[in-house]
Image (cartoon, rainbow, N blue to C red):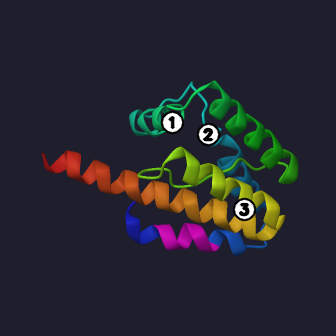
Amino acid sequence: MDSGRLPAASRLSQSTSTSDQAWLESILAAHPRLGQSKIESTQSKAEQARLNAGDDSQRQVLSQLNDLYEKTFPGLRYIVFVDGRDQAAIMEDMKSRIERQDSVAERTAAIKAMCEIAADRVRSASVEDDD
């Protein structure tokens, strides 16, 4: 996917089409939980490793926040562009999004984050192809 198509993907979040909504929801639900250890992508593994760098109590808090997020927003996973953010910043963002309790805004934020992640992957792949 080229980065010029990413805004179109983000606009799909506003679609009233049942099939568009089902497709986007399946993508959002497939995203790994923060702190999850079984990850396929090399980039995601590195990002998750940084999130898991804390002690057991921090990993437990992250797991509890994942649970609370998924209870607050059924069918969604907390999605954020992790690269460059530390664990404390990520957990603070997760808490504020849970406290907001706005499913529509959360779904839009999740889709925007997926687009940011996809754009980063495209940029990274382009750099690797140039080498």
Q: Earlier in the sequence, mark 3 or mark 1?
A: 1
Q: x%, y% of residue 39? A: 53, 29
Q: Earlier in the sequence, mark 3 or mark 2?
A: 2
Q: x%, y% of residue 10? A: 59, 69
Vertical order, 83 against 52 (above or below): below
Q: Where the C terminus falls, by quadrant?
A: top left
Q: CA distance from mark 3 to mark 1?
A: 20 Å
For the point 54% across and 72% down, the residue is: 8
Disc assigned to residue 34: 2
Tag 1: residue type? Answer: Gln
Q: Is residue 82 magenta?
A: no
Instruction: Please tell me how crowded label 1 is: few (under 14), some (14-19), or many (20+) other residues with Cα within 10 Å.
Output: many
Vertical order, 54 against 110 (above or below): above
> Disc 3 designates what residue?
96
For the point 71% across and 47% down, the residue is: 77
Q: Which residues are magenta?
A: 6-11
Tag 2: residue type? Answer: Leu
For the point 65% across and 38% down, the residue is: 33
